[in-house]
Each structure stands twice: as structure tokens, then as C-alpha cells.
Image: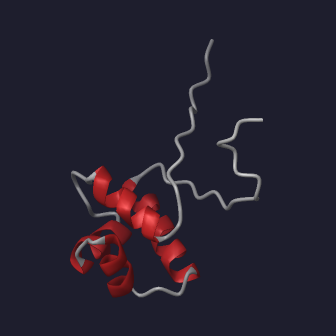
Amino acid sequence: MSPYVDLMEATILNARSLPRLGASIRRLRLDRRMTQAELARRADVSRQWLIGLERGQTPGLEVGRLMRVLDALDASLTIRDDHEGT
């Protein structure tokens, strides 16, 4: 077994679009009983930027900022290959 596999069961949230990504971030934040201001402070992003992220309205989304938000939520980003090869 790979050392990178988390042995604990994790919640997987589908985020194939910016609105779904934003909804997932909001759900994680609420699950952790954090305010937008608290999460923004912990992730070193503005509250306005976080509001846009949660609404799925972040054109040109900066991955570095997203990763800081996920880190502050103790969450991670996983990429799944949905391609069905022939």
C-alpha cells in the first residue's frame, strides 16, 4: 500500500466546476464552524476573495490561494482521471 493513501475514510466532494468547488469550500468551512473572516485570516486571503470563491465567481483562480484555503481547512485537492481509455 502506498504511504500516501490516507487510511481514514475521507469525505469526497465533487468539484468539476468553479461553482461546485466554491460550494465544497463553503461546506467544509461550515462543517468546521469557521466564519469567512476566520478562514480568510488563516489562509491569508481577503474575505472578498473568499466570498467570490464560495460563490464560484473567481475567474483566473489562483491555485496558490486555493491551496492556502484548503490547508487552513485541513483539506486537500485530489485529481481523478475520468478518461475512459479505449
Residue 66, percent across and down? 35, 59
* 19 relative to 27 in the view: left or right: left
Which residue is painted at 26% across and 79% down in the image? 47
* 53 relative to 83 in the view: left or right: left
Which residue is painted at 26% across and 54% down in the image? 61
* 63 relative to 17 in the view: left or right: left
Which residue is painted at 34% across and 71% down in the image? 43
| Image quarter in which the N terminus is found | top right
Q: Nearer the viewer, residue 5 or 58?
A: 5
* 1 relative to 10 in the view: left or right: right
- Asked if residue 77 is positioned above or below residue 52 in the image, the reply reads above
**Residue found farthest to the front:** 3
Q: Quadrant of residue 86?
A: top right
The reply to whether residue 10 is in sight is yes
Which residue is painted at 22% across and 77% down in the image? 48
Residue 27, percent across and down? 53, 74
Q: Nearer the viewer, residue 33 or 13?
A: 33
Q: Nearer the viewer, residue 68 or 85?
A: 68
- Asked if residue 25 is positioned above or below residue 12 in the image, the reply reads below
Residue 6, percent across and down? 70, 51
- Asked if residue 5 is positioned above or below residue 15 in the image, the reply reads above
Q: Quadrant of residue 41?
A: bottom left
The reply to whether residue 55 is in sight is no
- Asked if residue 12 is positioned above or below residue 30 in the image, the reply reads above
Q: Nearer the viewer, residue 35 or 60?
A: 35
Residue 68, percent across and down? 36, 62
The colour scheme used here is: secondary structure
